[in-house]
Structure formats: C-alpha cells, structure tokens
Image: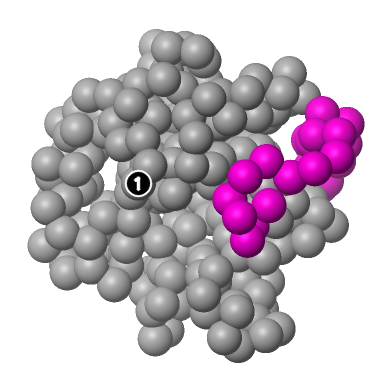
Amino acid sequence: MGRLDQLTFPIVQLSLDLTSLEEAIDTAAVAVEAGVDWLEAGTPLLLAEGLHAVEGLRRRFPDHPIVADLKTMDGGYLEAEMMAGAGADVVVVMGRAHEATIRRVVAAGRDFGVKVMGDNLGAEDRVECAVWMESLGVDFIVHHIGFDERGMIPGLSPMDELDDVVRAVSIPVQAVGGLSVEQAIQCPAHGAPLVVIGAPLVIDGAAFRPAGGELFPVLRRICDEIRRTPMP
C-alpha cells in the first residue's frame, strides 16, 4: 500500500523553505516528532539541493509523504518523473502553465504513482483557475498568494477567496501565503483540510532559515489544534 492510498483529513504539512538539506532534515525531525504528517521540499530547498533534497528526506523519513514544490511551468512530464524517482509522493504544477504542461504532469503522476497539486498563484481569477486545473486531472488545489505579491500589495491573504475556491472544486484544497498560526488552524473549518505550516510560522521567511525559539511545542500545539478543528 502506498503512502497516499488512504488519506485521513485533516493533514498537516510542513513546508521546508530552507536552503540547507542538513537544516531541513533537522527541522523535519522535530516536526515529525511533533505530529506533522507530510514534509514539503520547498522551492528554495530544491533550488539549493536539487534531487538530493528529496532523496535525503526520503531516506531519513521513509514513511512520510514528501511534496516536491517544483512550481513546474514547462517540461512537466520529465520534472514529475525525476521527482518521483527521487522519492516524492506529490509534485506541484502551476496554474499559469500551459494546459499541455499540466496535462503532462498529470500523466506522469499516473504513470509513476505520484499525486499532483495544482497551484493558482498569480492567476487572474484564482477560483476559475482552480476549477480548470481540477478539470485537467490534478489531485489537490493549492490556493496561493505569493511571497513577492504579498510584499508588493500588503493585506492580501488566501483566506479572502478560500471559501469560494473550496465551494468551486470537489478535490482537497490547501491555503498558502502569509497565514497566521490561528488562520492555519482554522483552514479545516473552511473545508481546506490540507494545512501547510511554514514561513513565517516556523521558518524565517525573509532569510529562509529555521526560525528562532522552541519549534517542537509550537508545532505540537498547531498539530493538536488542527486535529481538534471541526470540518464541515
């Protein structure tokens, strides 16, 4: 049985937006002990360490699903195949990519046994983009307000349209982008059962390094509260 054959929601995913594999593995070890379900090889980690990031996480955490946040825009089949070969369970394709790319990532997912997240970052209509990606066969929707976009336009939040996205699709949704701890905890109550914890909650979002303070109790509290949050 594969790691994603039977999903029980809510799921807590830690985004390892770091640039050192050693730091990522150390952070992930604390997260797993605290109750995190999925581990994400964040884009900065993949840029710094490449396939070795996924391979290293897979060796250290053989039973935990690994998300490779490639943000694929082209060459979809090859990128998904490479990440699957390295041990990823989930890959990410962008909704702003060409339809052909999304279809190729989905095809690779079926061929190599990985799930596909479709990310609506930067879409002119995020709700419409989510519906379109579902029609192309992605398994999950990432409803995403980007790091740079939030820096340029203060106050933007994925919570603004989260309910609309959840109502528009029939596949699991996750909200990403500048959420507070409390907002992340409330995502399941909005029907978004894939909860991402990352910068700036446990990662220094400006420097992409581990945040200061005690990581374990923060993550344990977040995991416990997410699992107590009623889902619709």
Q: Position of residue 132 (x, y in %)?
A: 31, 70
Q: How is the image coloured?
A: one colour
Check the picture and name the quadrant holding the C terminus. bottom right
Residue 39 lies, with reference to residue 158, above or below; the image says above
Q: Quadrant of residue 15?
A: top right
Disc 1: CA contacts within 10 A as few (<14), some (14-19) or many (>=20): some
- On the rendered structure, is 66 left or right of 181? left
Identify the residue position indicated by label 1 in the image.
47
Please provide the residue range marked out in magenta. 204-232
Amino acid carrying label 1: it is: Leu
Residue 189 lies, with reference to residue 109, above or below; the image says below
- On the rendered structure, is 208 left or right of 121? right
Look at the image and say whether residue 93 sits in the magenta stretch. Answer: no
Residue at screen point 13% across, 44% down: 77
Residue at screen point 42% across, 49% down: 43
Res 119 seen here: yes
Q: Position of residue 24 (x, y in %)?
A: 55, 31
**Front residue of 51 and 100:** 51
Q: Position of residue 81 (x, y in %)?
A: 17, 34
**Front residue of 60 and 5:** 60
Q: Secondary structure at mark 1?
A: helix
